[in-house]
Amino acid sequence: MQQKIFQHNREWCIVHYPVKPKGFAVMILGDQNHYVTEKGSFWMENETRRDWIDQLTKSGYLVFYSNLFGAHWGSEKAVESALNLYHYIKRQEIINQRIHILAEGTGALLLKNMLTGIQSNLRCAVVITPCISLRLHNEQERKQKFFLKKFRKEISVAYQVEEKEWEKVIQKDTVIPLIKTKNPLYFIEIIGHPSYKGQLEIVQSVCKERMRNHLPVKLEFFLPEKRPLIIRKCLRYFREHEKEL
């Protein structure tokens, strides 16, 4: 697998090059622990994610992603960095400017907050085991004091506010961009996934609102042992949205 590791906006980034380029690109927005360093990334070291990248590149896609400050929780700083990375890749590589996004976990928060800046250049997005509501995640973490304290600390750092002002960030958070965007969205839930189990109801609510408004949306459930098959569904969904260049 041919790749390039580099720094952009002081964050480590990776580009994986396709075996036979077909001109389309996939931007990965990983979960909070999906690190990128000067030596590699979570997606390269995790067997399932590495296979996903391998199948994407073998299918002709250029794949790129960034560390994005680690636990960013969808912050403005991470949104700006992700958008800047997209524009940088668009200038540096030979790709169709309209890309696909593959988001996982808290990457869904980033996608949600990026939509205003990228929707005209977004073909579709696949969102796996998403965290789309800070409020609901805060409620989930209330049951575990250590994780609650850690979460609120990370919010204050990511959003660059005083630690006591974390609640203001959560109060401003909304799923409206996911409800209103005209970009096709494909939500994938892994049954029994513990990290964001409190998010399913609001994901279903977003899907229902989109269907009511005749906006393209899909929701599908997978058993944990079927996780390796997810990428096939992603590839099929991407191809469905490549009919118009």
Image (tube, helix red, strand yellow):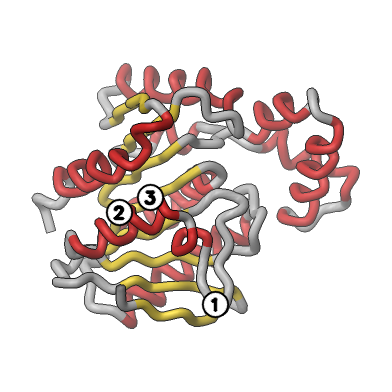
How far apart, in angstroms, are the residues tagged by discs 1 and 3?
Answer: 22 Å
Which residue type carries mark 3? Leu
Residue at x-position 56% and y-position 44%: 106
Q: Which mark is residue 100?
A: 2
Residue at x-position 38% and y-position 23%: 207
Query: Is the residue marked by circle 3 packed among few (<14), some (14-19), or many (20+) residues within 10 Å?
Result: many
Can residue 152 be seen? yes
Can you say whether 140 is above or below 5 in the image? above
SS category of the residue bearing label 2 = strand
Can you say whether 26 is above or below 107 in the image? below
Q: Which mark is residue 102?
A: 3
Of badges 3 and 2, the one in the foreground is: 3
Can you say whether 165 is above or below 118 in the image? above
**Mark 1 or 3, nearer chain start:** 1
How far apart, in angstroms, are the residues tagged by discs 1 and 2?
Answer: 26 Å
SS category of the residue bearing label 3 = strand
Q: Position of residue 208 (x, y in %)?
A: 38, 18
Front position in the image: 174 or 187 = 187
Residue at x-position 29% and y-position 45%: 231
| Residue position marked by numbered label 1 in the rendering | 39
Which residue type carries mark 2? His
Query: Is the residue marked by circle 2 packed among few (<14), some (14-19), or many (20+) residues within 10 Å?
Result: many
